[in-house]
Amino acid sequence: MASSDWRPLATPDTLRERAKILRSLRHYLDARGVLEVQTPMIGQHTVTDPDVQAIVVDGYGYLQTSAEYFMKRLLMAGVGDCYQMAPVFRHEENGRLHSSEFTMLEWYRVGMDASELMEEVASLCDCILGAAEYGTLDYDSLVGHLKGPRDELDLAFAEACAGLKGRWFIVNYPADQAALARVYKDRPDYAARFELVIDGVEIANGYWELTDPAIHRDRFAADLQERQARSDTLPQVDESFLTALEHGLPDCSGVAVGVDRLVMLALGFDAVREVMTFSTPPFRVNKH
């Protein structure tokens, strides 16, 4: 029996408006000499980050949670400023702001630090949403002096962000949440990482990128220890990425923007599914 749930989630008019926004995003970066690239959606390896769950494709590897590793390998090969706008995949329950498959705009700027890239992110968002003021908040100001397990901190942070009105860059993340951002030499307790929150919706996550391959390896090892403590999957470290790092990642900053969320805000909707063609069912994580 055929399913009656065959229609797209978004209306044709919404999809036309979405297409205009995607063209505007590309035009913004193209006009600044940032090269559009295309990297694989399936890779042999995935990220080690304990808070990011990849989807296994048996016999092939993993659906990519972002283009980060591939794009940084392009940077190390001399491609220079580049961007990619494409589907990425994560094991998450579908919800108002989440989908197992979603569209990410990710770009890297050689020679920029985090502050400079924040200015560019704000400028890009202004092109889509209209101009507005941007404020900055320290991570600690959102979670206060809360100490405890990482999941409690993440929940407190998410709840605080959901209550923010206006456009806010969250800065000065604690060093233990640096991910692949460098820590400040003069402030080693803080990472050069930022997040943009617009009207309670987390839109972008950016780093002044870590370049030291030895520190990368240490962080990957710490990630795997945390995963083991959680009885979670243990992906193999991407040695190709680490080998590329030995050749030298240029001084750069990078950012990932949730395109569906940005489109949702631009068109005045309340959920990402309202600006997507079809829903993606939640995936199960294969325990490999």
Image (cartoon, rainbow, N blue to C red):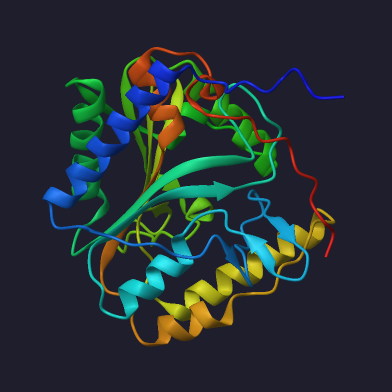
Q: Is residue 167 above or below residue 204?
A: above
Q: Is residue 256 above or below residue 98?
A: below
Whether residue 199 is visible to the viewer of this picture, yes or no, is: no
Q: Which image quadrant is residue 221 in?
A: bottom right
Identified at 66% across, 43% down, the residue is 150
Place of residue 225 in the rendered image (x, y in percent of width and height, measured from the top left): 73, 65
Identified at 46% across, 59% down, the residue is 67
Whether residue 17 is visible to the viewer of this picture, yes or no, is: yes
Identified at 47% across, 27% down, the residue is 142
Place of residue 189 in the rendered image (x, y in percent of width and height, measured from the top left): 43, 54
Q: Is residue 281 above or below residue 201?
A: below
Can you say which quadrant of the picture contains the N terminus? Answer: top right
Question: Which is more toward the observer, 279 or 256?
Answer: 279
Q: Which image quadrant is residue 141 in?
A: top left
Question: Which is more toward the observer, 263 or 185?
Answer: 263
33 vs 82, left or right, is: left
Can you say which quadrant of the picture contains the C terminus? Answer: bottom right
Question: Which is more toward the observer, 68 or 100?
Answer: 100
Place of residue 111 in the rendered image (x, y in percent of width and height, measured from the top left): 18, 64
Identified at 23% across, 48% down, the residue is 117
Q: Is residue 184 above or below residue 268?
A: below
200 vs 146, left or right, is: left
